[in-house]
Amino acid sequence: MNIVEIINKKREKQQLTKEEIFYVINDYVAGKIEDYQMSSLLMAICLNGMNEDEVLFLTDAMYHSGESLDLSKISGIKVDKHSTGGVGDKTTLILGPLVASTGVKIAKMSGRGLGHTGGTIDKLESIPGFQTAMSLESFEQQVNDIHFALVGQMGNLVPADKKIYALRDVTGTVDSIPLIASSIMSKKLASGADKIVIDVKVGEGALVRTLEEARTLANLMVHIGKNANKEVICVLSNMDEPLGTHIGNSLEVEEAIEFLKGIYEKDVYELVMTLGTLMVQMGLQISEKEAKNLLIKNLENGKGYQKFEEFISRQGGNLERLEKAQKVFSVKSVKSGYINQIHTLKLGEIVRAIGAGRYQKEDSIDYGVGIVLSKKVGDFVLENEELLKIYVHEKDMEIGRILECFEIDVHYKEPTPLIYEIIK
Ligand code: URA
C-alpha cells in the first residue's frame, strides 16, 4: 500500500477500505508516514468527508493503535464524559469531582486545546505540580480510591489520537465530523468506561456550527458506542456564546472552583446539571429526580468541592499557586444597548492569540492569560461600562478587535436556548 495513492483516493472523494485505513494509522504511529502526508490526508477527509463504515474503521484502527484500560478490577459502573470543544467550557473540572462525590466512578482521558477551543489537560496543567500522566495501575487505583482520575493521552493509550490530535490543532483540520467522532470515540473506548455522556457543542464557538451537523455527529458517536456495546448519550448544547464568564486556562480553573463553592453563572449551572444528572443516573441506576437531587445536595454541602481538592492534591497540584497574568485591561462598551451576540469564535481566537492556545505543535501555553466577561448575551450595557477584563503579558492590546466581538443594539433579542436536544 502507498500513502500517496490513499491521499489521492480521498481527494477524489472515494471510499477508503478497512485495510487502507489500518495501514495509514499503523504506519503513521510507527513514524513511517510523515506529518506532511498525514496533514494532506486529514485535509482531504475534512473537505470530502467519510461514510459511516470508514468512520467505524478509523475509530477501530485508532483504538487498536495502543493499549486500552481494563477497568474490570474497579467494581460498579464506570462513567465518562467528553465535550466536542468550545470556548470557556470548564464543565469537566466541575462535573468530574461533583459527580464522583455522589459515588459514581469516573475514569477520564482528556485532550489539550484544539484550534480555538480549550482543552481540559491544558487547564489542569495550569495548576502548578498537577500531573496529567500516570501509570495504568495508578489510574485504576485512584478511581477505586477516590472515584475520579483524569489523565492526558498517556503512555500507549490511543497513540494515534495523540499524534493526529496535535497535528489537527495546527493544520486547520479540526472541524471535521469523521475526525471528531473517531478521535473522541477511540479514546472513550480505550479508557474503558461502561457509559459515556458527550456534550456536543453547536454554534459559532464550536467545531460544528449547525444543529444538523451536530445531530449527524451525535448519531455517529451513539452508533459507534452501540457497535462496541457501550451506552452513549449526547447532549446538544449551545456554543453561540462562551460558557460562563472565564476563558483561558487558569482563569477557567478559578471559575470551576467558584462554582463548586456555590457561586455560578446560570448557563454553567444548567449545563452541569443536565450532563451531571445523566451521569449520575447512568452510574447509580437511579431516577432523574434522585440524580439531580444528589447533585444539588453535594454542591450545597460542599462535598463536590472537597472531592475537587482531593482530586487535585492526589494528582500533585497546588491550588494556592494558580498563575494569573499580571496585566489586566478593562474593555468598555462604546455604546449603550442590549448585547445580542458575542462572536465566540473570534473571541476564542483572541484568547488563543494572547497565548492560551497553540499555532505550532511545539508551542508552549501561557496559562495565566485570558478573558473574564462582565456581561453575557441578553444583558444591557451602558456606554463606557465594562464588557470584560483581559489578562495579558504584553502591553498593547487591540481593543478594537475585542469590541468587534460584541453585537450591541437598542432592541432586545431573545437569546437561543442552552440545551437543544438529547440523542441516545
Ligand atoms: N475532543 C476530542 O477529543 N477530539 C476532537 O476531535 C474534538 C474534541
Image (spheres, grey):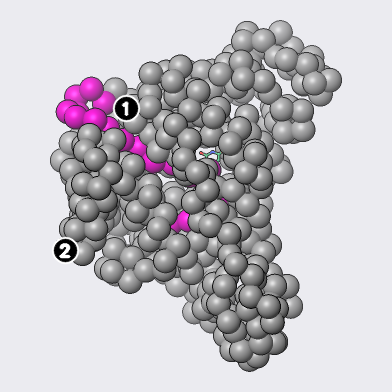
Residue 44 against residue 108 in the figure, above or below: above
Image quarter hosting the N terminus: top right
Residue drawn at point x = 52 percent, y = 65 percent = 247
Instruction: Sort mark 2 into few (<14), some (14-19) or many (20+) by Cα contacts within 10 Å.
Output: few
Magenta-colored stretch includes residue 155: no
What residue sits 65% from the left and 55% below the top? 204
Name the residue rendered at 55%, 62% in the picture.
242
Q: Quadrant of residue 319?
A: bottom left
Ligand 1 sits in which quadrant?
top right
Residue type, mark 1 in image: Asp
In the image, residue 28 sits, relative to residue 246, either above or below, namely above
Tell me, yes or no, if residue 360 can be seen here.
Answer: no
Q: Secondary structure at mark 2?
A: loop
2 above or below 248?
above
Q: Nearer the viewer, residue 139 or 174?
A: 174
Q: Tell me the CA gap for discs 2 and 1.
A: 29 Å
Residue type indicated by callout 2: Asn
Q: Earlier in the sequence, mark 2 or mark 1?
A: 1
Query: Residue beneath label 2, please?
Result: 301
Could you tell me residue 371's position as x and y percent?
Answer: 54, 71
Other-residue count near label 1 (Cα within 10 Å), few / some / many at <14 / 14–19 / ≥20: many
- The residue singled out by tag 1 in the image is 194
Horizontal side of residue 115 vs 371, given as left or right? right
Locate residue 326 relative to residue 214 in the image: left or right: left
Q: Nearer the viewer, residue 381 or 28?
A: 381
Quadrant location, the C terminus: top left
**Image point (55%, 77%), residue name:** 379
The quadrant holding residue 14 is: top right
In the image, which residues are magenta? 71-90
